[in-house]
Image: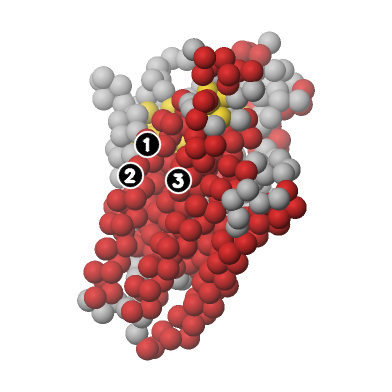
Amino acid sequence: MWTRVRAFTRGERDAETLYAYRQAGTQVHPLLDAAERRRFDLTLSGTSPFAVKRHVGLELACAWNAFALQTLADKMLEADEAADPSTVGFVPPVTFDQVNAYYAEVGRWLGYASEAEHDPAFELPARTLPAKLPKWSPVEPCPRPHLDAMIAALDAMRLHAEAAMHNLEKTTPEADAPKLARLRGQFEGALSKANYASGMYRPGASLALHEQIEEHAKGAIEGLYRVGQLIGYPALLTEGGRSASPRKGEAPLLHTALPGEPGFDRWAMTDPNSVAFLRKDPDAGRVIDEMWALDPDPAASVALWHEIRRAVETGGAVVAKNAQGRPLGFYFCTPYCAIYEARRPLVLGETPVRKGQRFTFERAAEGVRVGYPFKREIVVGNFQTGAAIDYCDPDQPPPHDE
């Protein structure tokens, strides 16, 4: 009780959610170790690290991101506990926001890594990698426990990156020496920044020195985060965040035409079994047109839609059916998407979907003209047939906000 009282008087927030995230993320370390062992086994059989199959590299890069973010968040929680044992279980708002931003991303990267491990055709949305860190909490100066945590996380990331780089160098054939030299250059640049920041660090440093160390530490962490992805998947050095071109015999890359492009279909995301019915409803056609016209980023919506399509194409999801074995039909809000069921754990956008869980896609301009944000999200739940169609009026607030 007194812990709660002290935390309340200091404006601290309950960290129960953060501790749950921390526990859930413990799988990061064995996942990354297993991925690295699989690549090492491949290289022992003669495969260059620069020629591993795409899904192997994507798995390693995504696993590294999960590891780095989990490490940063764990160290910040540990540092706060050490700095203020009297309020363990509660953290300052700035710490809560920063740690939550890291932990919230871990599940997404773990999901991507798991999909890549099991699906040779797995593909990330374009420009997903190399990824950037979540933004730093906007507070000056950075709290001392934050800086302690940043240095501790920096050291952990550096040690793991050094070991991974060492293994990569040992297994790279001479023919790929120029590529290795380029990667080595970027790695050494990031490593130099990390060593510099750690060398400057002094516990209890003056405010002026503290701020200088903070800036160097942030840059070093960002650099290691990026170079760790390159070590995991060296092909990122040349391809950047582009999607790979399909190899011979593979299915072509997904494409959904945007407004103004040849082949554009305003019903592209709608349940195929329901399109004929919905075409006869002029209000449904009107709100579908408004959905496309008022979407501030149609490409982002299409990218999320492609993640669903890819999950279906690779057997990760199927159209959900009722007890009689018939499809459940479409979700009541635009784009009137079909309802699916996950056949394996998925991460769609930033939404984790458990095996057996039903989900769909909502993309709606409801209330946009009166100040509400455009909605673009994966919806999970227990869906029922027969729900009334929602025409998602841009000029009216969502029903639950009226």
Q: Residue at x 51, y 19 (%)?
A: 3
Q: Alpha-carbon neighbours of circle 3 within 10 Å: few (<14), some, or many (≥20)?
A: many
Q: Residue at x 57, y 71 (%)?
A: 192
Element marked by disc 3: helix
Write down the quadrant of residue 139 in the picture: top right
Counting from the top left corner in percent of width and height, residue 244 is at 46, 65
- For the residues labelled 2 and 3, the Cα–Cα distance comes to 10 Å
Element marked by disc 1: helix
Q: Alpha-carbon neighbours of circle 1 within 10 Å: few (<14), some, or many (≥20)?
A: few
Q: Which residue is mark 2?
A: 27
Query: Looking at numbered disc 3 in the image, what kind of residue is underneath it?
Result: Gln
Counting from the top left corner in percent of width and height, residue 6 is at 58, 19
Do the numbered discs 1 and 2 sit on residues whose CB atoms are within 8 Å? Answer: yes
In screen coordinates, is 254 left or right of 325? Answer: right
User: Image height check: is 31 above or below 335?
Assistant: below
Q: Residue at x 71, y 25 (%)?
A: 372
- For the residues labelled 1 and 3, the Cα–Cα distance comes to 10 Å
Query: Looking at numbered disc 2 in the image, what kind of residue is underneath it?
Result: Gln
Label drawn at residue 70: 3
Do the numbered discs 2 and 3 sit on residues whose CB atoms are within 8 Å? Answer: no
User: Image height check: is 254 above or below 98?
Assistant: below
Q: Which residue is mark 1?
A: 24
Label 1 or label 3, whichever comes before in sequence order: 1
Tell me if I can see residue 156 in this picture: yes
- For the residues labelled 1 and 2, the Cα–Cα distance comes to 7 Å
User: Image height check: is 138 above or below 40?
Assistant: above
Label 2 or label 3, whichever comes before in sequence order: 2
